[in-house]
Image: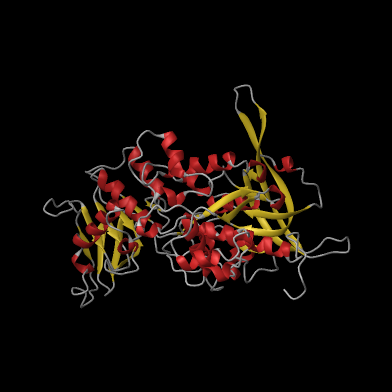
Amino acid sequence: MDLNDKEIMPGEILPLVIIGNGPSGICLSYLLSGYIPYLSSESSHPNPLLQSKLGEHPQLSLLEQDLEYLCEGLEGRSSNPVAVLFDSLLLPDSDFGLDCASPLVWRYEPERAIPHLVLGKGPPGGAWHAMEGSMLTLSLANWMELPGLKLKDWIRDKRRNVRNDRATPAEIASYYQHYVSQMSLEQSFACGTTVTSVTREPSNKEGLPNCWRVMGLQRREGEELEDGASVSEEVPFSLLAHNLVLATGTNDIPARLGVEGESLPFVCHSFWELEAAISRGELDQSSDPVLVVGAGLTAADAVLAAHHINTPVYHAFRRSVTDPGLIFNQLPKLLYPEYHKVHQMMTQQQHPQSSPQQNTSPTSSPSFLPPCTSSSSSYPGYLSFSRHRVVAFRPDRKCVLESDSGQTTVVQVSMVLVLIGAHPNLSFLHDNGRLLGINPEEPISCRRNPIEVDPFSYEVSMADGPGMYAMGPLVGENFVRFLKGGALAIASDLAKRRREGRSWKGDWTTDR
């Protein structure tokens, strides 16, 4: 879709622009397009207190109810209360493995729609289109779905056998793209767009009110050549919006260690670089070990991928294997057997210096570790270095690791995968949006420093002016099941402003 298809005229101010077309932006677009949730008269919520609160005003939609009141007393796996509320309403008792019917019904009320535009670099689905491969998603399939279209039913139409409750990233990406089409949201999506600047536009003598200016480039296909190919060009655009939503996700910029030699060609920062090396036949059981740095799920996927082709693996991470904050200690073993296997490997196949009992006296002379090829262990070809950090990478493919006590080990590797998370690309904001974080001294990070927002409206606390919201991983939500709460909070806040006479077009009272 071209921006011109919206017939945006110079000087026209859009009610809302959403930057990011992943599941966060898609879900918000659904709510803003006139799809309104109500309490069903035919089913109830298993939580009697929540059901009682919802029943106090059964004629009101969820967007018209007091979200803060409904959130009181609810507990869940998110620190954002509205995320817990909406997840509980969409998937009641799902944490207990139950498949209870949602007490919500969705009504299409186009007169309540709020015009908006969703900007995204690629097709609807965002980063899911970059996640190739056959590995399964961490979340259950129904946790990945958006309101109004059952993911399991959609997958069942695509593949004959749906024995697993989890889906592949390719299936999820295709589902999100189909969702936009199925729900007739396409007219609000402008794909192929890269935002380069977001600034606060002050009111002027010509009558322009305070608003947000969004500038960038849109990729458009040009004339078709003789060989059937077409030439694309990037066309600048500039938009004005009363309200702005940041929904970019946080997978744009891989986090780096910041150590010597990290820019050497054998040091990679993406799981897909491992898959590419495997597909090119560069790794096998005779290769020097692959060093995986990190203790998250992507690092675990890398361990599994290399182990599957019998390539030796060194696995270095800062935490102890018993640290309750380690993601593997939070996952049900029966539901995630492959990650439980990696955790077993991390626990049972540790380098001696990983043990706290062994770390009693530092040494200044590093030891050189030969390849981990012993067949006497439970997991041959794998060795973990818990409580270790990388000190340096050397051009001869040797890596220096240091334990908590200062003991060093040098390992010879074929390649390195540094998989320690990622940062969002907020280069279109001043100082990469750093001032919007809970700690303005640190870069924005989903886990360590999310954007600070009002917990019940998701409006950004430290924005240059009113009407800027953030949602999804930018506010600490890594899982699709919880990022949908941001869509509810924002849509509810806009609806509230309209009811109170503070229109979503930007008519703000002076005491804001």
Residue 453: x %, y % from top left: 58, 69
The x, y position of residue 141, in whole percent, is 41, 48
Report if residue 455 is visible in the image: no
Q: Is residue 316 left or right of residue 144?
A: left
Residue situated furthest left in the rendering:
376
Q: Is residue 231 left or right of residue 264?
A: right
Residue 372 falls in which quadrant of the image?
Answer: bottom left
What residue is drawn where x is 70% and y is 61%? 199
Q: Is residue 287 visible?
A: yes
| Position above or below: 209 against 168 | below
- In this figure, which colouring scheme has been used for the structure? secondary structure
- Report how many numbered discs are placed on residues in the image: 0
Q: In screen coordinates, is 255 left or right of 185?
A: left
Horizontally, is 303 left or right of 43 in the view? Answer: left
Measured along the vertical axis of the image, is residue 310 above or below residue 296?
Answer: above
Q: Residue furthest bottom?
A: 361
Residue found at x 40% / y 46%: 272
Asked if residue 223 is positioned above or below residue 384 in the image, the reply reads above
Foreground pick, 485 / 464:
485
Give the farthest residue toward the top: 226
- For the C terminus, which image quadrant? bottom right
Residue 482 place in picture, x, y as percent: 48, 59
Image-quadrant location for residue 314? bottom left
Q: Nearer the viewer, residue 109 or 241?
A: 109
* Residue 175: x %, y % from top left: 49, 42
Foreground: 475 or 500?
500
Q: Residue furthest front?
A: 42
For the N terminus, the quadrant is top right
